[in-house]
Image (cartoon, grey):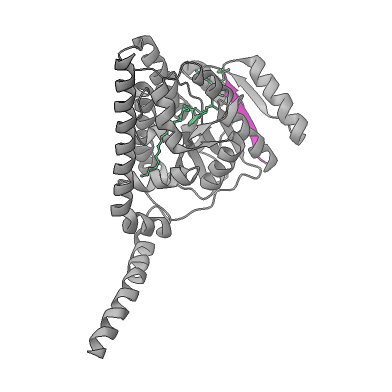
């Protein structure tokens, strides 16, 4: 009997270690370190909000920084702000990501990129029944096709870089790119699309030592977000509150920590980490520890996810009931 107990206890203790060891041996791609110092970091949408915070931080960490956006005026203001706080000059490129020729010209001028951060994005929340198709197309064009344009333009020189150090392509998604949210049919579709692009692209560029990252921020206090709030449906705000909210500087910090360790999925806060575990799917995972949490937590996390859906559908029901009363 004592023998049996001992055997049972050692099995229970050994199993997690065996699983950890197994995951350590099989996780692919392998862990990597990507440095920013003296590298060329190119940030789209770098004149405002999260992109501007990323540009600030990249400059602080000793990178050569280029930023791209449509408005030259906003770009110049961003350049001045970064010079004021860091003493460093960033290069600015005025172009629309929807215009492939303009993007190609900017990327050619800027020179080979080591860390490409495709961050530009537009978000106009509205129920699809109400939203104009033009607005749907606008979001898909800027967020998804614009991302294709940027990667297509930058990739050849990235692959041929002379310095053979690991490089990065980081794409700005959103928690609304991990779960569909009321009012975000077009926006969520554009951000989910980026995930498919990223999973496939990582397999294609791993041979060039290029590492793809996806960043998933919650609501973030930016000029774009202030604008969004003016016309956000009430239910969008209620449901999105579940993801928490952040300052752009902290999002930038989390994003670079993830980029530097080549993380494929980069959550930005605690809620985001839960969401990332719940939606791990078949995405690559370099960290055997996170892989362990994903495997062991799967069942419980699914229960938490179902509880979130229960609360969300409750809010939707309540909202309809209130509207029918008035
Ligand atoms: N703020 C939030 O709550 C969250 C934001 N995100 C994502 O983070 C990213 C940045 O958002 P945020 O900082 O809030 O946005 P902002 O609106 O504050 O900034 C957007 C940036 O993108 C540029 N941009 C917009 N359209 C284009 C275009 N067609 N071509 C080139 N540049 C363009 C803007 O400059 P210009 O207008 O001059 O072109 C600006 O520099 C987006 O992808 C967004 O979806 C994700 C989760 C939450
Ligand atoms: C299993 C556990 C789940 C844990 C929590 C899930 C919460 C999900 C909330 C999603 C919020 C989406 C915010 C989008 C922000 C955004 O992109 C806009 N501001 C536009 O920029």
Q: Residue at x 53, y 41 (%)?
A: 255
Does residue 142 appear anywhere in the picture? yes
Which residue in the rendered view is the most extreme toward the bottom?
2
* Quadrant position of the N terminus in the picture: bottom left
**Image x and y of residue 132, in percent:** 36, 9
* Quadrant position of the C terminus in the picture: top left
For the stretch drawn in magenta, what is the main secondary structure?
strand
Does residue 211 appear anywhere in the picture? no
* Residue 270 drawn in magenta: no
Residue 241 lies, with reference to residue 273, above or below; the image says: above
- Viewer-side residue, 54 vs 306: 306
Q: Residue at x 45, y 21 (%)?
A: 123
**Image x and y of residue 92, in percent:** 64, 23
Q: Residue at x 51, y 29 (%)?
A: 119
- Viewer-side residue, 155 vs 303: 303
Which residues fall within the magenta stretch? 63-69
**Image x and y of residue 98, in percent:** 46, 17
- Viewer-side residue, 99 vs 313: 313
Residue 117 lies, with reference to residue 121, above or below; the image says: below
Q: Is residue 46 left or right of residue 129?
A: right
Q: Is residue 99 left or right of residue 222?
A: left
Give residue 91's quadrant in the image.
top right
Give residue 130's quadrant in the image.
top left
**Image x and y of residue 18, in percent:** 33, 70
Q: Residue at x 37, y 48 (%)?
A: 277
Q: Is residue 64 left or right of residue 24?
A: right
Give residue 240's quadrant in the image.
top left
């Amino acid at each position: 009997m004592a023998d049996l107990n001992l055997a049972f206890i050692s099995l229970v203790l050994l199993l997690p270690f065996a699983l950890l060891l197994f995951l350590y041996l099989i996780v692919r791609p392998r862990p990597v370190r990507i440095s920013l110092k003296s590298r060329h970091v190119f940030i789209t949408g770098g004149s405002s909000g999260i992109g501007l915070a990323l540009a600030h931080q990249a400059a602080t960490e000793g990178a050569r920084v280029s930023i791209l956006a449509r408005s030259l005026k906003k770009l110049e203001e961003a350049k001045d702000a970064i010079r004021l706080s860091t003493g460093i000059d960033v290069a600015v490129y005025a172009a629309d990501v929807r215009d492939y020729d303009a993007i190609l010209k900017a990327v050619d001028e800027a020179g080979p990129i080591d860390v490409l951060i495709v961050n530009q994005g537009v978000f106009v929340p509205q129920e699809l029944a109400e939203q104009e198709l033009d607005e749907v197309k606008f979001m898909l064009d800027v967020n998804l096709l614009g991302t294709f344009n940027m990667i297509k333009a930058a990739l050849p020189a990235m692959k041929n870089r002379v310095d053979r150090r690991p490089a990065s392509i980081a794409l700005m998604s959103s928690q609304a790119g991990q779960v569909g949210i009321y009012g975000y049919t077009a926006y969520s579709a554009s951000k989910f699309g980026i995930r498919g692009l990223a999973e496939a692209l990582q397999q294609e560029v791993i041979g060039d030592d290029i590492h793809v990252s996806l960043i998933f921020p919650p609501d973030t206090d930016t000029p774009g977000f202030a604008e969004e709030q003016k016309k956000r449906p009430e239910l969008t705000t209620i449901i999105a509150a579940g993801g928490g909210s952040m300052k752009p500087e902290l999002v930038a910090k989390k994003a670079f920590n993830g980029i530097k360790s080549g993380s494929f999925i980069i959550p930005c806060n605690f809620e985001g980490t839960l969401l990332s575990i719940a939606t791990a799917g078949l995405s690559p995972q370099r960290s055997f520890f996170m892989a362990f949490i994903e495997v062991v937590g799967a069942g419980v996390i699914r229960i938490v996810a179902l509880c979130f859906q229960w609360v969300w559908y409750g809010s939707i029901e309540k909202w309809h009931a209130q509207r029918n009363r008035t």
